Image: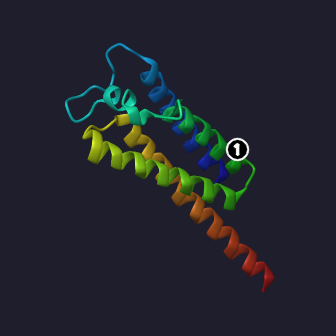
Amino acid sequence: MRYLIFLIALAGLVDASLALKIHYDTGTEPCSINERWDCGIVNHSPFSQIHGIPVAAIGIAGYLLLAVLALARRRLLLLVASGIGLAFAIHLSLIEKNVLEVWCLYCVISQGIIALITLLSLVWLAWALIAARRRAI
């Protein structure tokens, strides 16, 4: 399970890196699909930074942390960190939906990735707790 979560976290890292590239790009965006789907609008909005740090860079750091925690078998910390990441991603998705009214394809992909990592982390921790309980009996 740790290698699966590690690989999914790497996919998240790639996704966040692509979003960061768009954050600093001034040209035509590759995911400018229509008026409802435009990564450029989202990644150049005032909500794309927190205290001057691009949200995509926070995502890169977060996915790196999740990958390390998975490899280190730190199940509880992984679940807590991924839960925080999921809550942050939901917050950003609500901004896209309700404030910007534009969706970023990379952000939606990241939302799916962090949701999957959180679910897998929960399952992995539950398996470990069940196995520990069985050994204790």
Q: Residue pushed farthest bottom?
A: 137
Which residue appears at 61% of the width and 37% of the height? 61
Residue shown at 69% from the left, 73% from the top: 129
Q: Quadrant of residue 46?
A: top left
Badge 1 marks a residue whose secondary structure is helix
- Which residue is at 41% across, 52% downward? 90
Q: Is residue 29 above or below residue 101?
A: above
Q: Residue at x 28, y 46 (%)?
A: 97
In the image, residue 116 above or below residue 43: below
Q: As rendered, which of 119 and 29 lies closer to the eye? A: 29
Of residues 93 and 128, which is closer to you in this image? 93
The image quadrant that residue 125 belongs to is bottom right
Who is closer to the viewer here, 125 or 85? 85
- Whether residue 41 sits left or right of residue 131 in the image: it is left
Residue 1's x, y, as percent?
Answer: 63, 55
Q: How is the image coloured?
A: rainbow
The one nearer the camera, 70 or 17, is 17
Residue at the far front in the pictured view = 51
- The amino acid at mark 1 is Val
Neighbours of disc 1 within 10 Å: few (<14), some (14-19), many (20+): some
Residue at the farthest right position:
136
| Residue found at the far top of this picture | 27
Whole-percent x, y for residue 120 in the image: 55, 58
Q: Which residue is mark 1?
A: 68
Q: Which x, y percent locates residue 96?
A: 32, 42
Seen in the image, is 36 located left or right of residue 19?
Answer: left
For residue 130, side relative to residue 15 (left or right): right
